[in-house]
Amino acid sequence: MIGDLLFIVFAALTFFFGLGVIVARNPMYSALSLVAVLISMAGLFLLLHAEFLAWILVIVYTGAVMVLMIFVISLLNLQKEEPIQFTAIRKWGVAMIGLFGILFSIYVFQDPLVSYLRPQALPVPPEWGAVEMLAVDLFTRYLLPFELASVLLTAAVIGAVVIARKDASAKE
């Protein structure tokens, strides 16, 4: 019972902070929303008894990668943008999307074929979530995507620094 409640809380936090990543006009607010998404995802991993993955998510991604991204955003020194003006059409659009989301959620949770209310427990191997199993998967099956992600992050940071330097030298 408490696990179901914690799942709903962490899933809702992940959803709303993820929405904040997309909607935020200020890049710093967007990055901080992403930090909150990563922390709530770590809570979901803890509920799955994948403690190592949860702590790695908090330590590596939230503690290192996001601090680096926030540093790059600060280095870019972006100008403030004007806030979005909520006209009547935009308010109605947001209200319709919210109403559709609520109705869809009610439909999905009430559908007996989906059975979200009483999910069946799947058998979990005892080594699931262990460091050894993660290491074997990471360094065999997922080695190329892991390395490509690190190259992509490095290229993004280098590109942001080059753009910031170019803009700084043009202003002088």
Image (cartoon, rainbow, N blue to C red):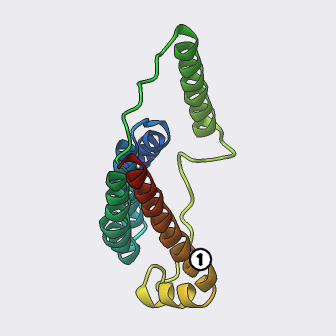
* Left or right: residue 3 compared with residue 151: left
- Relative to 115, residue 153 above or below: below
Please rate how many residues cluster around mark 1, counting C-alpha atoms within 10 Å: few if below 14, some from 14 to 19, many from 20.
Answer: few
- Relative to 104, residue 86 above or below: above
Which residue is located at x 63 percent, y 83 percent?
Answer: 144
**Which residue is at the far front?**
172
Which residue is located at x 46 percent, y 17 percent?
Answer: 85
45 or 140: nearer the viewer: 140
Asked if residue 69 can be seen in this view, the reply is yes
**Which residue is at the far right?**
113
What x and y, as percent, mark residue 159?
Answer: 50, 63
What x and y, as percent, mark residue 33?
Answer: 37, 47
* Left or right: residue 131 compared with residue 159: left
What x and y, as percent, mark residue 157?
Answer: 45, 65
- Relative to 126, residue 65 above or below: above
Quarter of the image where one finds residue 151: bottom right
Element type where label 1 sits in the image: helix
The amino acid type found where label 1 is placed reads: Leu
Which residue is located at x 53 percent, y 91 percent?
Answer: 136
* Left or right: residue 97 compared with residue 153: right
**Which residue is at the far top?**
88
Which residue is located at x 69 percent, y 45 percent?
Answer: 113
Q: How many labels does the image show?
A: 1
Quarter of the image where one finds residue 111: top right
What x and y, as percent, mark residue 46?
Answer: 36, 66
Residue at image mark 1: 148
19 or 157: nearer the viewer: 157
Asked if residue 1 can be seen in this view, the reply is no
